[in-house]
Image: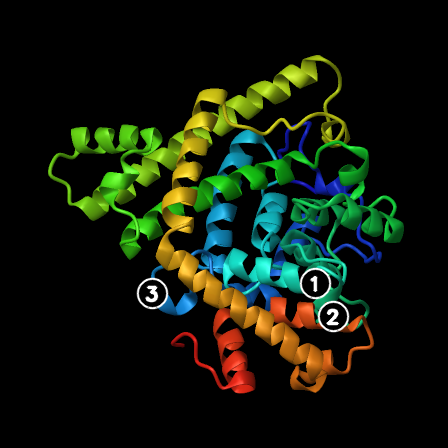
Amino acid sequence: MPGLNLAPWASDPRRSRGRRIAEPPSPPRTEHQRDRDRIVHSNAFRRLVYKTQVFINHEGDLFRTRLTHSLEVAQLGRSAARALGLDEDLVEAIALAHDLGHTPFGHAGQDALAECMAGHGGFEHNLQSLRVVDKLEARYAAFDGLNLSFETREGILKHCSRGHAERLLAEEPEGPAWRFVHGGSPSLEAQLVNVADELAYSAHDADDGVRSGLITMEQLLEVPLVARHHAGVLATHPGVDPRRALHETLRRMLSEQIHDLVDHTRTACEAAARQGRLDAEAVRRLPRLVAQSAPLRDETLALKRFLFQQLYRHPRVVERTGVARRVLAELFDAYRSAPGEMSPDYARSSGDPARTVADYVAGMTDRFALREHHRLTGQRLFDW
């Protein structure tokens, strides 16, 4: 397709491994543009606007949700992809789809469903994201799911246990789970989204944490990466109000992280290319090439540790996530006992009953889960 200006190691959509069900091309779009468009129009994507990132949806209009998080990951990813000569559309497609399988109430909901499904094949949100685009979306007459390209599906499956990977490989021997059994790496575009995901949530969770009052700016300044950029902000903008100072600090921090990521990754790719031909397939046989430099990676890890200790494990967050886990566990039990309480499509499913309930609960938004819990139990555990 004319107009593409990709590096030799990029995932060229003209050389895509294709879709599980063959379809004629859709010019002038590339295969990866087509994937992105299908994701944006999916039901699962729209639901992300009412799914928790850290703060439950009703707690404030300005806190990030799974949707805004996905958009921020896509923005960071596209910026870096353009600088590296990677396929921006593939990066965007993976970024927008990577959380489609996340449960309501964030990681608390995932933990609850994992416990409920422990005797029924387990539950992993990355695997559920692939399940959403492969099977659960019901928009097309010719197939279930979105029938995305291999490259997008490979990027969506960020993590996968050995047991799940072996089951996926039994269904699709050359599918995206191959590397979790045989080793190797995903495409550079998938690797880039993995890092952009970490950088995005570390920055915006710090912002939301201060906005919520659960962490203070003084606490955040104990993190060397944040303190260094905050000092630079005050040096160039003395007297700036604290809120703007925080935004400017995080903006500068992200800029440094992305510039460092691009420089370090470009150097790694050029070094690998000097050892032999480096194309998209060769990338899959090598250790991961997309990474920050060691000093900045250490600083980024220090920020992540701070957020885990001071925000994600804050007593108020722990209390609310405990209630959220209870909501999902009780919903799971209620639907297992009375499948007819689910929507008709799920109630009529002939598949594994526990998996059907997990699919239904995982697809809920925060507020729908709370309403259903209230309807089925009479309890009102959160305002909504």
Identify the image's colour scheme: rainbow, by chain, secondary structure or one colour.
rainbow
Q: In terms of sequence position, does the residue under pointer 2 or pointer 3 come before the other? A: 3
The answer to which of marks 2 and 1 sits earlier in the sequence is 1
Q: Is residue 340 above or below residue 155?
A: below
Q: Residues within 10 Å of mark 2 (few under 14, many from 20)?
A: some
Give SS at disc 3: loop
To which residue does mark 2 refer?
354
Residue under label 1: 117
At mark 2, the secondary structure is helix
Amino acid, disc 1: Met
Estimate the x, y position of residue 89 in percent, counting from the top left.
60, 46
Mark 3: amino acid: Gly
Q: Nearer the viewer, mark 1 or mark 3?
A: 1
The residue lying at 44 percent from left, 80 percent from top is 380
Cα separation between marks 2 and 1: 7 Å
- Describe residue 316's horizontal placement relative to residue 40 as left or right: left
Q: Which residue is mark 3?
A: 60
Q: Does the CB distance between marks 2 and 1 fall below 8 Å?
A: yes
